[in-house]
Amino acid sequence: MIPRHQMELVFDNSHLLPKPGHRARRLRSAAWWFEQMHRAVDRATPWGKPAFVPRPHQDSFSLPPANE
């Protein structure tokens, strides 16, 4: 025989409710994180500019003839 009544499934979600002050702490944490990201972007090297000036590079090296 098939039961003809609706089953009820209940979960205790009380542990999922935010604790007092949790939202404010999350907002402070997010504000801190975005401030760090803004600082990193402000300190970044502009596109097209090298991060440092490379040392001079010599492509070839000419030697005097060996019989001199």
Image (cartoon, rainbow, N blue to C red):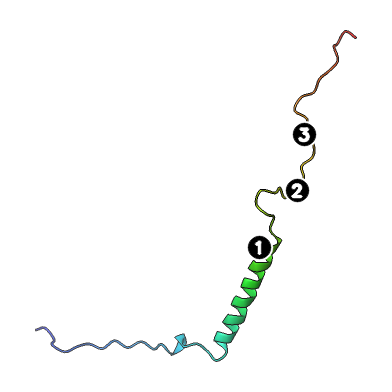
Q: Residue at x 46, y 88 (%)?
A: 17
Residue found at the very far bottom of the displayed protein: 20
Indicate the secondary structure of the residue bearing disc 1. Answer: helix
**In the picture shown, does residue 22 fall above or below 43?**
below
Mark 1 and mark 3 in contact (Cβ < 8 Å)?
A: no
Q: CA distance from mark 2 to mark 1?
A: 18 Å
The image quarter containing residue 38 is: bottom right
Indicate the secondary structure of the residue bearing disc 2. Answer: loop
Q: Residue at x 29, y 86 (%)?
A: 9
Closer to the camera in the image, 30 or 20: 30
Q: Position of residue 54 (x, y in %)?
A: 76, 42
Query: Which amino acid, mark 2?
Result: Phe
**In the picture shown, does residue 57 fall above or below 33?**
above
Q: CA distance from mark 3 to mark 1?
A: 31 Å
Left or right: residue 19 versus residue 67 is: left
Indicate the secondary structure of the residue bearing disc 3. Answer: loop
Q: Residue at x 68, y 58 (%)?
A: 44
Q: CA distance from mark 2 to mark 3?
A: 14 Å
Closer to the camera in the image, 14 or 35: 35
